[in-house]
Amino acid sequence: MSEAEADRYSRQVRFAPIGAAGQEAIERASVGVIGLGALGSVVAEQLARAGVGALRLIDRDLVEFSNLQRQTLYDEDDARRRLPKAVAAERRLKRINSRTAIQASVDDLNGSNIEAWLDGLDLVMDGLDNFETRFVLNDACRKAQIPWIYTAAVGSYGLVMPVVPDGPCLRCVVENMPAAGSSPTCDTAGVIAPATAAVASVAVAAALRRLTGRLGGGDVRLVSIDVWPPRFQSLRPDADLRRACPLCDQGRLEYLHTEPVRAITMCGRNAVQLIPGSRSELDLDTLGRSLEVFGPVESNEFLLRCATAGFELTLFRDGRAIVRGTEEPSVAKAVYARMVGS
């Protein structure tokens, strides 16, 4: 380590649980960040500042002005130019730490490409906005024996849980994927920056513990955080929440081997049809009420329709969706995730 590097990380090295050996481990590590929104942008920035050797980033979305309230890697120029988040994040992180190798992809991560994307990583950070991809990630990381850290935040509240090879997985706590529209999203319930920053910071602390050899299966906790009013709770998933797990107990990689959401561009209609690999009947009445925050909702017994911000979303009872206003599958998936969630 050069004198300049020693000075750069000196306060972190003086923290006894990390020390010089821990800093060297951090600098050798390769970490993936999936999703570069409110959680992922804070996570990626803190890891780069901590000196992680390589960061592999992936996100399918573009920077918008509504992101700037909480997504710390971006500025008004990024939003004005509608840069892909992965591109804007890569540029910013290289200015923060030129020694961290950054590899960024503007792409949608799913069962068809996740195993190649994970190859060579020591740890994965979850900055996702949907459970479908999280369940694919959970399967793929368990198969490859790669640890990952689950994070989620909405409103003033969030969750963090490390998932390590010798500890409980996400499905030990959430056995089945929540139904589409059953959970609030940042667009339906709002979100404040202190919540996402707090959740991301706890996740990065867990990442540093893992990279320095101080977080094993017996140390895993599910941490819930609410910043309004402040509340912090920690539970042992293996003792307090553990249930029969189709993955850990039966070895079923159900989501990794399920066909991901198919996106079909509808020629000449400026629309994309989304067909989920796992089909389930939607509760259109409940979904209709949650979508009212975006604009008027039209519905009948077969479907509902809502228009917002240049897009129109049509949801069918069998789980299919049509997003009008784009021919880009990644944009359509991002619109769906904002409005419906998983």
Image (spheres, rainbow, N blue to C red):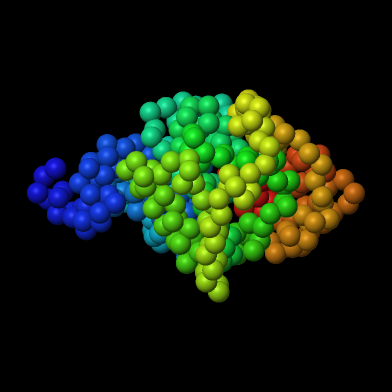
Left or right: 209, with 342 as reference point = left
Left or right: 213, with 154 as reference point = left
Q: Quadrant of residue 30?
A: top left
Give the vertical position of 39 relative to 232 (above or below): above
Q: Residue 288 appears at what percent x and percent y?
A: 79, 57
The extreme right residue here reads 301
- Say which residue appears at 52% left-offset and 71% top-offset: 230
Q: Quadrant of residue 170?
A: top right
Left or right: 85, with 314 as reference point = left
The extreme left residue here reads 3
The extreme bottom residue here reads 229
Q: Residue 212 appears at what percent x and percent y?
A: 32, 43
Who is closer to the viewer here, 136 or 113? 136
Who is closer to the viewer here, 142 or 260? 142
Give the vertical position of 159 relative to 120 (above or below): below
Who is closer to the viewer here, 285 or 321? 285
- Say which residue appears at 54% left-offset and 36% top-offset: 137
Confirm whether residue 225 shows in the render: yes
- Say which residue appears at 77% left-offset and 46% top-offset: 315
- Say which residue appears at 43% left-offset and 41% top-offset: 216
